[in-house]
Image (cartoon, helix red, strand yellow):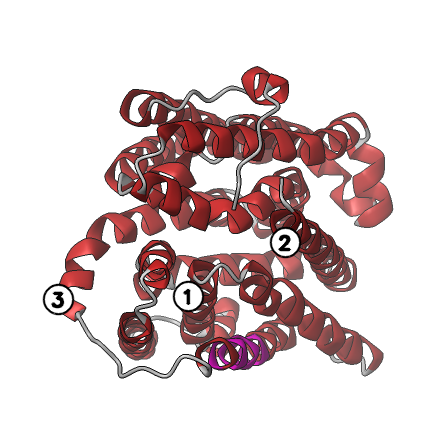
């Protein structure tokens, strides 16, 4: 790995590590101070808002990363500006429409404790969407550190500080917790826009809008975004409906801990995504294989110690970090760790397909995984509760990874396998 890739990777590893500590601090603080049931209400509302935000995201981040990487190779800053403006306009329009729809529906349904939380969290539909489309533009420009700093550092840091102030003032409730999330995402958006302005300032160019072309490219990315985000929140929402808020809180704790295993894969995805675009554009399939092997190797190197730690010491980790009330999440945590370990071992199959113009194949795999997850949730949650949700989620992750690995081999002639990646000694050039 050359010096620039190594520096980017190490910087992102550090950023991810700090983000993980901050996110864990926020989760632990909320779980311990609120207790399982109030924390469950907070988790249910924020997970549902994430699902409602799907139309606002609507696949723009992946589309932006791929096209911005292409435009950057051609130094076409006018189209980069036009794409960001088009995506931002879409997010603004859809978020406002969803907020108006929610306010209209709220008048026709009986009031309940969670309705007020939803009302407080409505600005998240806009703030998260705009932050992500801006960060995606920075990723396409091969500025992964700037791209990830707003969401990974600024947002959890600001929320942690706000929550700490609320605890000291004895004012932490599910409602004020939601407000703290909204405020922290507003600050993250300001940071993302400042980074974008800094990147674009040396390259003045008139905006070139091609909304028709980009909207025609959007549907597969939108459907893929839908499948991905629904899959991530499905178990929490169904537990809140079919079981109880406390089970939703326990699952969220286990799911957040298990995502620690996937952190190295997320880091290398951020660094290597533009390299996939360049290698595919040059028709260099051998280089695609080298990049893929390198990503799997580095992901496994970073993930295995954490996976073993969480699997073997799941109960004491939950007891020490979250408290005795959350030890019941131990079986779910172990199952989710197994699922994420398979995810890391299969490498960046989804990213590889997305960056090489095969996003429809990614969509088919993710929809299959979502169906597996959803059907198993409906079958297992009523009888097995938290453990059933964990089995369903892990099975969904494993199924889409296997399907996409087969597509990568068949369509791109890139072989995916942890043993092959570990034994390979070749490195990609930037």
Q: Residue at x 53, y 41 (%)?
A: 429
Could you tell which of marks 1 and 2 lies nearer the N-terminus?
2
Q: Is residue 379 visible?
A: no
Task: Look at the numbered disc 2 and give the secondary structure of its residue.
Answer: helix
In the rendering, at what x and y percent does residue 110 appear? 38, 71
Residue 271 shown left or right of residue 217 in the figure: right
**From the viewer's perspective, is the residue at label 2 or at label 3 nearer?**
2
Question: 280 and 317: which one is in front?
Answer: 280
Q: Residue at x 27, y 26 (%)?
A: 411
Question: 105 and 4: which one is in front?
Answer: 4
Q: Quadrant of residue 191?
A: bottom right
Q: Quadrant of residue 74?
A: bottom left
In the rendering, at what x and y percent does residue 69 appear? 37, 57
Compared with 201, 344 (above or below) is: above
Task: Look at the numbered disc 3 and give the secondary structure of its residue.
Answer: helix
Residue 212 disc label: 3
How far is mark 3 from mark 1, CA to CA? 19 Å
Residue 37 shown left or right of residue 89 in the figure: right
Question: Which residue position is annotated with label 2?
Answer: 8
Which quadrant of the rendered structure holds the N terminus?
A: top right
Q: Main secondary structure of the magenta part?
A: helix
Magenta span of residues: 186-197
Packing grade of label 3 (10 A; few <14, some 14-19, many >=20) is few
In the rendering, at what x and y percent does residue 41 appear? 57, 60
Question: Which residue position is annotated with label 1?
Answer: 137
Question: 346 and 248: which one is in front?
Answer: 346
In the rendering, at what x and y percent does residue 88 appear? 33, 75
């Amino acid at each position: 790995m050359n010096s620039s890739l190594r520096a980017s990777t190490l910087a992102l590893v550090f950023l991810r590590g700090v983000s993980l500590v901050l996110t864990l601090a926020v989760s632990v603080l909320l779980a311990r101070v609120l207790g399982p049931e109030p924390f469950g209400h907070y988790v249910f509302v924020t997970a549902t808002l994430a699902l409602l935000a799907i139309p606002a995201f609507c696949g723009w981040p992946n589309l932006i990363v791929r096209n911005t990487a292409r435009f950057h190779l051609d130094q076409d800053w006018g189209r980069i500006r036009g794409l960001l403006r088009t995506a931002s306009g879409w997010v603004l329009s859809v978020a406002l429409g969803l907020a108006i729809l929610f306010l209209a529906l709220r008048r026709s349904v009986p009031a309940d404790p969670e309705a007020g939380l939803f009302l407080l969290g409505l600005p998240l539909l806009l703030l998260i969407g705009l932050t992500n489309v801006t960060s995606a533009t920075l990723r396409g420009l091969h500025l992964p550190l700037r791209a990830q700093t707003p969401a990974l550092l600024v947002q959890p840091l600001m929320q942690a500080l706000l929550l700490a102030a609320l605890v000291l003032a004895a004012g932490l409730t599910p409602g004020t917790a939601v407000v703290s999330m909204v405020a922290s995402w507003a600050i993250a958006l300001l940071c993302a826009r400042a980074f974008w302005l800094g990147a674009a300032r040396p390259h003045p160019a008139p905006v070139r809008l091609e909304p028709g072309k980009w909207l025609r490219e959007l549907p597969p990315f939108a459907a893929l975004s839908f499948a991905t985000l629904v899959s991530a929140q499905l178990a929490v929402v169904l537990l809140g409906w079919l079981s109880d808020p406390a089970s939703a809180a326990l699952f969220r704790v286990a799911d957040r801990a298990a995502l620690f295993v996937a952190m190295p894969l997320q880091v290398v995805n951020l660094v290597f995504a533009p390299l996939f675009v360049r290698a595919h554009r040059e028709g260099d399939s051998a280089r695609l294989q080298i990049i893929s092997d390198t990503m799997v190797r580095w992901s496994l190197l970073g993930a295995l110690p954490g996976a073993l730690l969480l699997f073997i010491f799941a109960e004491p980790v939950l007891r020490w970090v979250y408290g005795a009330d959350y030890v019941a999440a131990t079986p779910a945590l172990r199952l989710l760790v197994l699922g994420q370990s398979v995810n890391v071992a299969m490498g960046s199959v989804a990213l590889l397909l997305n960056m090489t113009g095969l996003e429809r194949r990614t969509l088919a795999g993710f929809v299959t995984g979502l169906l597996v997850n959803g059907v198993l949730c409906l079958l297992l949650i009523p009888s097995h509760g938290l453990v059933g949700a964990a089995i369903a989620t892990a099975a969904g992750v494993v199924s889409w990874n296997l399907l996409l690995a087969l597509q990568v081999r068949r369509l791109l002639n890139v072989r995916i396998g942890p043993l092959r990646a570990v034994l390979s000694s070749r490195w990609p050039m930037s």
